[in-house]
């Protein structure tokens, strides 16, 4: 059966900041309003609302329920939530659109990373018996992965710094980014180690943020958007939870998801990769088979801003924007979750 | 070695402690600062005109920001209540006491507080009450500035005036 045409028709995001003096609802409201208005679909006609957020981030159970105040759930709406990045909420909405139950969906993701000590909060995603009690945190795990790559000759410190320099330079064009500017590889390599072999700039900034996209099917998408970013393939793959059984120098899950999503079926113009740590972009480029001609992370990527539970969804929005503007005919959007690129979601967007 | 030879591990202890620093947010911050000045402020929805107190910065029905601030009187109506007679851990108030949903005049959502200054068995739906504040020098950015609500002595409010807010 041929997939139903479903496209991204609008995208909005909050300005990423180190600490937002707002509650989630206040942070979300302008973002949702902008996404709805930009979509041209009246709010009460949107068929489905799906969000991604994390209770551990908020430090409260069922924290996503509060976000419903930003939606306007009266008359009652059809709503769902994933305890993951909003990119996975987009996947759920896409499946529902494929089933033909609805013609449009608003997907959002948000996170206030600043409420807790993020790297410690991230420890709680690990298995509760063997790893979490050791309190190995997200930066330390990334450092372990980077060490394997450097010692194995898979990446170099220069290449990692090169990713940072290019991301910061690209982020100058992104008003929502936290870190942007002109830096050279030499300057970056002169910086001290933060969690050896990672320097601070190899790690993503801690960001509070939110993002929303509207998906629409077929004729509705064509009627509200002159050039929807059509989802031509989407695939999600997961590796084992235990770090010890994985080959951390590569990403079989990203490779498989890219292949299943159809990344290699045609030329790729732009790829927005959710690579929170500099070296992860290098793993992903190789695993996903992206050629050097691909414009990777023109937004500055997660090294420019990394709002937890929204940074993956933002990659979809940024990629879609390049389709709308005509800068790209074919774009790849990618989101990751779990420690050391454990889970990977890959999507191919096309302008026609 | 068979399974039977292994003593089953029935539990392990893995203590977890994470500290969080919350932001009250813009709307709640204004509410809390107003309390420190002896005022109760809510916010009005520009679409449905409902007044929310405490304000959350949004109208959950219309999904719009509620920026217009409304100062509310310190008088309202008990819409529903509960007499607490069972002791519990961490209890700071003498039993029995009454927690109540109080609809301040001009508000469209009830505020949770205590009713005192009257025997518990006399508290009833529709009872008119007013806020009793702590001495001014003890005020902070907290709803605890109001110790409790006490009866005003006015006749009870008509059920029709608050039935939509139960």
Image (tube, rainbow, N blue to C red):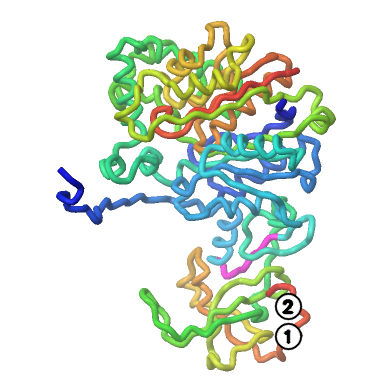
Tell me the quarter of the picture where residue A351 sits: top right
User: From the image, which quarter does the N terminus of chain B lie in?
Assistant: top left
User: From the image, which quarter does the C terminus of chain B lie in?
Assistant: bottom right
Q: Which secondary structure, mark 1?
A: loop
Note whether A256 is above or below B10 in the view shown. above
State the CA–CA distance, disc 2 to disc 1: 8 Å
Given residues B34 and B118, the one toward you in this image is: B118
Left/right placement of residue A296 relative to residue A60 reads right
Which mark is first along the chain, 1 or 2? Answer: 1
Task: Please tell me the numbered disc located at residue B157.
Answer: 1
Q: Chain of mark 1?
A: B
Left/right placement of residue A38 relative to residue B25 reads right
| Residue visible at 72% across and 32% down in the picture | A10
Query: Do the residues indicated by labels 2 and 1 lie within the same chain of the protein?
Result: yes
The span picked out in magenta is B37-43
- Disc 2 marks which residue? B162
> Residue A336: x percent and y percent?
49, 29
Residue B121 is covered by the magenta coloring: no
> Residue A35: x percent and y percent?
71, 37
Given residues A164 and A250, the one toward you in this image is: A250
| Residue visible at 71% across and 64% down in the picture | B51
> Residue B145: x percent and y percent?
51, 72
Note whether A165 is above or below A113 in the view shown. above
């Amino acid at each position: 059966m041929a997939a139903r045409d479903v496209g991204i028709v609008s995208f909005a995001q909050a300005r990423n900041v180190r600490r937002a003096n707002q509650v989630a609802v206040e942070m979300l409201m302008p973002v949702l309003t902008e996404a709805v208005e930009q979509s041209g679909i009246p709010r009460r006609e949107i068929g489905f609302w799906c969000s991604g957020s994390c209770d551990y981030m908020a430090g409260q159970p069922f924290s996503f329920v509060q976000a419903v105040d930003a939606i306007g759930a009266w008359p009652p709406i059809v709503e769902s939530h994933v305890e993951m990045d909003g990119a996975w909420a987009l996947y759920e909405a896409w499946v529902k659109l494929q089933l033909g139950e609805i013609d449009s969906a608003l997907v959002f993701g948000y996170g206030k990373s600043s409420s807790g000590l993020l790297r410690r909060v991230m420890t709680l995603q690990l298995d509760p018996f063997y790893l979490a009690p050791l309190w190995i945190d997200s930066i330390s795990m990334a450092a372990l992965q980077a060490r394997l790559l450097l010692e194995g000759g898979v990446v170099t410190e220069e290449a990692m710094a090169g990713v940072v320099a290019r991301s910061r330079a690209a982020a100058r064009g992104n008003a929502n980014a936290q870190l942007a500017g002109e830096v050279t590889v030499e300057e970056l390599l002169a910086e001290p180690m933060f969690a050896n072999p990672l320097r601070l700039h190899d790690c993503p900034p801690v960001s509070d943020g939110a993002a929303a996209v509207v998906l629409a099917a077929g004729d509705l998408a064509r009627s509200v958007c002159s050039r929807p970013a059509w989802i031509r393939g989407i695939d999600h793959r997961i590796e084992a939870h235990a770090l010890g059984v994985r080959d951390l120098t590569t990403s079989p899950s990203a490779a498989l998801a890219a292949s299943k999503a159809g990344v290699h079926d045609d030329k790729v113009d732009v790829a927005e990769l959710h690579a929170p740590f500099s070296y992860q972009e290098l793993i992903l480029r190789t695993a996903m088979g992206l050629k050097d001609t691909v414009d990777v992370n023109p937004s500055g990527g997660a090294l420019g801003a990394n709002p937890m539970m929204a940074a993956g969804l933002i990659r979809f929005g940024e990629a879609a924007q390049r389709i709308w503007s005509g800068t790209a005919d074919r774009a790849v959007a990618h989101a990751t979750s779990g420690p050391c690129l454990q889970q990977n979601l890959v999507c191919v967007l096309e302008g026609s | 070695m068979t399974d039977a030879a292994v003593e089953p591990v029935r539990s392990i202890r893995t203590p977890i402690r994470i500290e969080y620093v919350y932001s009250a947010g813009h709307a709640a911050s204004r509410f809390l600062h107003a309390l420190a000045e002896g005022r109760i402020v809510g916010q009005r929805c520009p679409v449905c005109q409902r007044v929310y107190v405490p304000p959350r910065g949004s109208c959950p029905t219309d999904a719009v920001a509620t920026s217009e601030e409304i100062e509310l009187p310190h008088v309202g109506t008990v819409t529903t209540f509960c007499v607490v007679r069972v002791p519990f851990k961490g209890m700071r108030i003498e039993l029995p006491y009454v927690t109540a949903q109080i609809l301040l005049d001009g508000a469209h959502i009830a505020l949770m507080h205590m009713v005192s200054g009257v025997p518990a068995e006399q508290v009833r739906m529709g009872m008119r009450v007013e806020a009793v504040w702590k001495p001014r020098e003890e005020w902070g950015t907290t709803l605890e500035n109001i110790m409790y609500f006490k009866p005003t002595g006015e006749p009870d409010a008509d059920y029709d005036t608050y039935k939509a807010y139960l």
